[in-house]
Amino acid sequence: MAHWISVVVAAPAHSSVAGALTYRSASALPPGTLVRVPLGAREVLGVVWQTLDSSGDLPEAQARGIAGTLEGVAPLSATWRGLIGFTSAYYQRSLGEVALAALPPQLRDMTAVQLARRLKRPVQDTSGMQPASHLIALSPEQSKAIAEFDADNRPALLFGATGSGKTEVYLRAAAAVLARDPGAQVLVMVPEINLTPQLQARFEARFNHLGKERVVALHSGLTPAQRLKSWLAAHAGHARLVLGTRMAVLASMPCLRLIVVDEEHDPSYKQQEGARYSARDLAVLRAKLETEGAAPGTGVCRVMLGSATPSLESWQSTLTGRYQRLTMNARINGSPTLPTSGGSLLPNGARVVAVATGGLPTVRGIDMNHQPRHCIIAPPLLEAIAERIARGEQSMIFLNRRGYAPVLACHDCDWKSECPHCSAYRVFHKIDRTLRCHHCGFTERVPRACPSCGNIDIAPVGRGTERLEEHLAELLADIRRPDGGQVRIARIDADTTRLKGALESQLASVHAGDVDVLVGTQMIAKGHDFRHITLVAAINPDGALFSSDFRAPERLFSLLMQAAGRAGRDARQAAASEMWVQTFYPAHRLFACLKRHDYPAFAEQQLLERQAAGLAPFGYSALVRAEAKTQEVAQGFLNAASAQAQAAGLPAHEQITAYPAVPMMIQRIANIERAQMLVESASRVALQTFLSQWQAILFETRRQAEFKSLVRWAIDVDPIAI
Ligand code: ADP
Ligand code: ZN
Ligand code: ZN
């Protein structure tokens, strides 16, 4: 007798097979089984989603039989399927797309025979073998954080200053879970694993007593074969600890008991294509699902988010008590901790300003209004850098713009190096004398003369890291190191680290002390445990103060706090370490909070503003983006779909505000016009209800003659940039 099953296959939301398809199978297959099924003329990987009582309306002849199952791979768990189901519904994408994207790509392409061969390779089980690693004594704050975490079961936010030893807390929490239950698994997520090779080594060293290959990595930097191997190890329960980037949140881990999200505020946790999920938000949800789905007596699944500058969403959750807050104010480097406030008001209205700055660098703002005109590095900052060099210490200069200059311009006729395909300027890269578009990649040699008037005197305007490096070399040419040698300047950004291994070797030379001044983009500001940097400077952070995106100040504050966190990580130098900020707006509140390393005060003020405006985390939003050959079509599509939603009187539509379509910030990329429409609601449920109904209308609208095959659209739920 044939069994009827519904199978999900990879299909974008826009295709006709977005849901599950019905197939026949000779044997009963439990949900979660991996199968290969015919789809059109191809054979593809699918996941059995449900067993059906009958084929329903489908005539028997039309349901095709499955091609086979992937022997040796256990079915995906009900909890995993629940997570995929939620992700698909919440982020408004098809089940098949989300489910298949969560599986390693190589699994999709492999035949059953190839997979069987792969699975045959034995994994050595050396568990029980012990090189028990030597543990460091915890700081009082670390011990307290761990004790509090153990005594609670809410999602936890570890609010720990940069250098307060958050990683050690993650390691201890993971070790406790793994020791308690020999089958338990732990997932540790980091924003960009390529930036933190140190971390993987630390986890491997700590847990290598568990046996070979018990710690695996899961991120896009792996080869397809490595990724499959890691995934299979996690799915089989052999891997006890998975260290990964955002994609790892959807990995199959049958006995997951702890999820750690390091630097939980980091924007890279938000997927920016396909299902635009937030891996941080899914981590919290997954912990809940894993707890509910756990076999009796196997305990709960906890989640620990960590940051020195938490997202305002997570921070607000600690204020309402939904999350537990664990606080570590002082740096490990041993400096005394000052009294802490949390930005609270005294009864007489006076604010307690003393915040923990134990061991954190002194923040110096430079008022650029009082510096020589057009100066790039203010004289006092230059002097401070020179002093560090003379003392053999390192400085880090940070500018969030790569290339030599953001624009090349002719002062005679006002020609600028616009990209012909985008609404953006092409960036001048001096090293190979090219103009490169950072959006579409269009690259040309720099013209000898102005293409518009023939003037040969075309000049760079503004400054990127490449030009800053050159400028610093000139400014510091006469400064000598303690050994009499010349200053060694290095630059780390996306341009200098294109080649595989380049980043690692550049970081290694910084760690080895072969660099005196490090210039770079935000790449160097995050996460690295540099030991010899005593001065960090932000050259030009003002842009974000006046952005139209309400999250820009939050991002700037956390970036500057992160950057400050790179200075003085060594106890011997902590006291004299400094963070310099050049600004034309020294009185801005953001800088006042930065000076005191006072995240709580910054958060308090931001949350008040957002509450008044009904913005996240007090309101919920989604963006619908559309792309077309003209703005008119892109905007017309969004406005038409919105008008139809109004006319149809969708459920919950009275709780929704849909704004008119507008061009996106970068309106045109690679000759494609981009528009967006913001949809807001004070209720998350109302927004969800509305979006799921509106999707059908969007599909419908796209079928209209004037938009047919001319528009691409996608919904971004909880967008992080507007
Ligand atoms: P964070 O992630 O909070 O910025 P890290 O976890 O990188 O901080 O820790 C900062 C430094 O302190 C690291 O070099 C780490 O090895 C060290 N460290 C952490 N905990 C301790 C401890 N209990 N005793 C001594 N050193 C520690
Ligand atoms: Zn010209
Ligand atoms: Zn371009």
Image: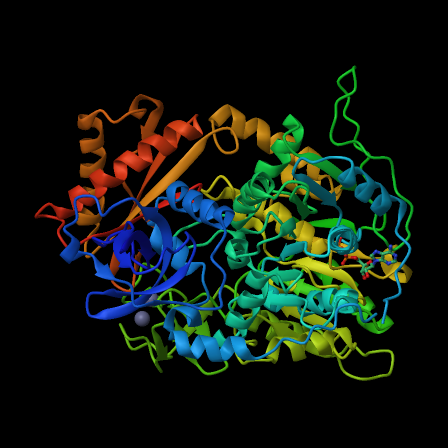
Which corner quadrant holds the N terminus? bottom left
The answer, for residue 221, to whether it is visible in the render is no
Q: What percent of the width, then of the height, locates residue 588?
A: 62, 39
Q: What percent of the width, then of the height, locates residue 383?
A: 77, 64
Nearest the camera: 78 or 574?
A: 78
| Residue at point 34%, 48% (across, down) | 51
Q: What percent of the width, then of the height, locates residue 153?
A: 69, 36
| Residue at point 82%, 40% (across, down) | 147
Which corner quadrant holds the C terminus? top left
Choose top left, top right, bottom left or bottom right for residue 526: bottom right
Q: Most extreme residue toward the left, as rendered? A: 705
Q: Is residue 714 left or right of residue 561?
A: left
Q: Most extreme residue toward the top, as rendered? A: 348
In the displayed structure, 648 sits above or below 325; it is above
Q: Is residue 437 left or right of residue 522?
A: left
Q: Most extreme residue toward the front, as rendered? A: 1
The answer, for residue 568, to whether it is visible in the render is yes
Nearest the camera: 545 or 61?
A: 61
Q: Is residue 426 left or right of residue 383?
A: left
Nearest the camera: 696 or 659?
A: 696
For ligand 1, the image quadrant comes to bottom right
Q: What percent of the width, then of the height, locates residue 106?
A: 43, 72
In the displayed structure, 520 sits above or below 180; it is below
| Residue at point 76%, 25% (across, down) | 351
Choose top left, top right, bottom left or bottom right for residue 328: top right
